[in-house]
């Protein structure tokens, strides 16, 4: 069984598909049992049937599985293989018309869509002392340096983004949607930000804190950072897209911020090359005035952008737009 699992993983990498193994496991287990189950029950049953590798069995993996299935239903709607029979209980859509299964198992419920919350628990963080040397001279830090700290387990999880310690440096996925040399920008609406320095300002990033549940067995290389950013992007822009979009996302670097009250953040800058069919459209009060900005053209009024975007804009203009700055941007305080 372990050999077969290894062969499957190698095949997935070979074909370049961002396959979500959690969904495949859930689909296989539910097809075998022919009954709705909770994510915890799916993993337990899958382990007994040999469909789940032993290393995937852990205290929080059922939460990751539930997030994957819920996201698949949210993004793909009727095209998803799954539906809910009750809150937190999932079944396969292929059985809806199977009269050999009790009718109560074949009736989907409609879950109310929740707005993405930025104040979340178990946020990925570093102690300020750990990254102080990296952020001392410039705002931009190479991805290899930060990933090295993660691989060395020099991190922890803060209680929440709103209740972090003063010496916590939180890690955020900061997604830039690119089309050639242009980046998609928007204005923060009233239901997205409660920080005065961000409200109604223009942003060039769709950002989300990286949390413990983002780290799955299949996101070890970047600690789930890219996957976290893609999920935020899917929710914010309602892409209704398939998971192979992960092939178009790449972690570029990290940008350090130093904000009011001395709090710091690490923004994981992820470039997402949008597909040709993509046309930005949103009707959310949290995201307004979507526009493309040419990164090869210097910005005259950087004050129009929110504080994080001001820092990332400088980096993106140098790496994507090839705009040469007068000197390296220092890491500075933002108020």
Image: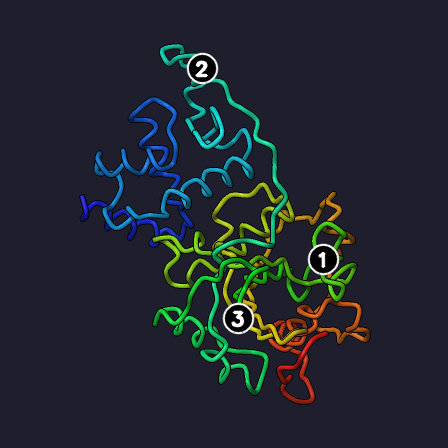
Judge whether 148 appears above or below 186 on screen. below
Instruction: Identify the mark nearer the N-term, 3 or 2.
Output: 2
Judge whether 189 appears above or below 330 on screen. above
Q: Residue at x 79, y 68 (%)?
A: 304
Q: Identify which residue, 305 or 198, lies in the foreground.
A: 198
Label 3 to label 2: alpha-carbon separation: 48 Å
Label 1 to label 2: alpha-carbon separation: 43 Å
Q: Within 10 angstroms of label 3, few (less than 14), some, or many (20 or more) residues?
A: many
Q: In screen coordinates, is 268 left or right of 296?
A: left
Instruction: Identify the mark nearer the N-term, 1 or 3.
Output: 3
Q: Name the element at disc 3.
A: strand
Q: Name the element at disc 2.
A: helix
Residue underneath mark 2: 104
User: Could you say where residue 149 lies in the image, as x and y percent from the top left?
Assistant: 40, 73
The structure's colour scheme is rainbow
Q: Within 10 angstroms of label 2, few (less than 14), some, or many (20 or more) residues?
A: few
Q: Name the element at disc 1.
A: loop
User: Could you say where residue 21 lies in the image, as x and y percent from the top left?
Assistant: 36, 44
The label shown at residue 111 is: none
Residue underneath mark 3: 169
Q: Within 10 angstroms of label 1, few (less than 14), some, or many (20 or more) residues?
A: few
Q: Residue at x 25, y 50 (%)?
A: 55
Label 1 to label 3: alpha-carbon separation: 20 Å
Quadrant where the N terminus is found in the figure: top left
Q: Identify which residue, 89 or 76, lies in the foreground.
A: 89
Instruction: Identify the mark nearer the N-term, 1 or 2.
Output: 2
Residue underneath mark 1: 194
Q: Identify which residue, 11 or 281, lies in the foreground.
A: 281
């Amino acid at each position: 069984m372990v050999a077969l699992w290894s062969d499957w993983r190698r095949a997935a990498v070979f074909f370049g598909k961002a396959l979500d193994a959690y969904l495949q496991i859930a689909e296989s287990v539910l097809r075998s049992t022919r009954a709705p189950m909770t994510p915890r029950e799916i993993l337990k049953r899958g382990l007994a049937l040999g469909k789940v590798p032993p290393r995937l069995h852990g205290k929080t993996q059922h939460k990751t599985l539930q997030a994957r299935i819920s996201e698949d239903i949210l993004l793909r709607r009727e095209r998803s293989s799954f539906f809910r029979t009750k809150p937190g209980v999932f079944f396969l859509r292929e059985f809806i018309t199977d009269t050999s299964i009790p009718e109560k198992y074949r009736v989907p419920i409609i879950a109310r869509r929740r707005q993405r919350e930025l104040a979340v628990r178990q946020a990925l963080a570093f102690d300020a002392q750990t990254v102080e040397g990296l952020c001392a001279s410039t705002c931009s830090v190479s991805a290899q340096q930060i990933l090295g700290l993660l691989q060395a387990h020099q991190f922890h999880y803060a209680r929440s983004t709103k209740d972090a310690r003063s010496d916590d440096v939180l890690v955020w996925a900061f997604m830039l949607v690119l089309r050639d040399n242009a980046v998609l920008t928007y204005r923060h609406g009233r239901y997205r930000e409660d920080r005065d320095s961000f409200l109604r300002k223009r942003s060039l990033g769709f950002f989300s804190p990286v949390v413990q549940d983002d780290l799955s067995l299949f996101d070890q290389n970047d600690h789930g950072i890219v996957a976290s950013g893609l999920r935020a992007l899917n929710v914010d822009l309602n892409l209704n897209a398939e998971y192979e979009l992960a092939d178009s996302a790449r972690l570029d670097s990290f940008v350090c911020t130093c904000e009011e009250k001395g709090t710091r953040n690490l923004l994981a800058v992820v470039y997402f090359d949008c597909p040709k069919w993509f046309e930005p459209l949103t009707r959310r009060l949290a995201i307004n005035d979507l526009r493309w900005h040419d990164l090869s053209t210097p910005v005259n009024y950087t004050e129009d952008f929110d504080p994080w975007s001001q820092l990332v804009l400088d980096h993106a203009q140098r790496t994507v737009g090839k705009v040469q700055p007068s000197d390296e941007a220092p890491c500075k305080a933002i108020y």
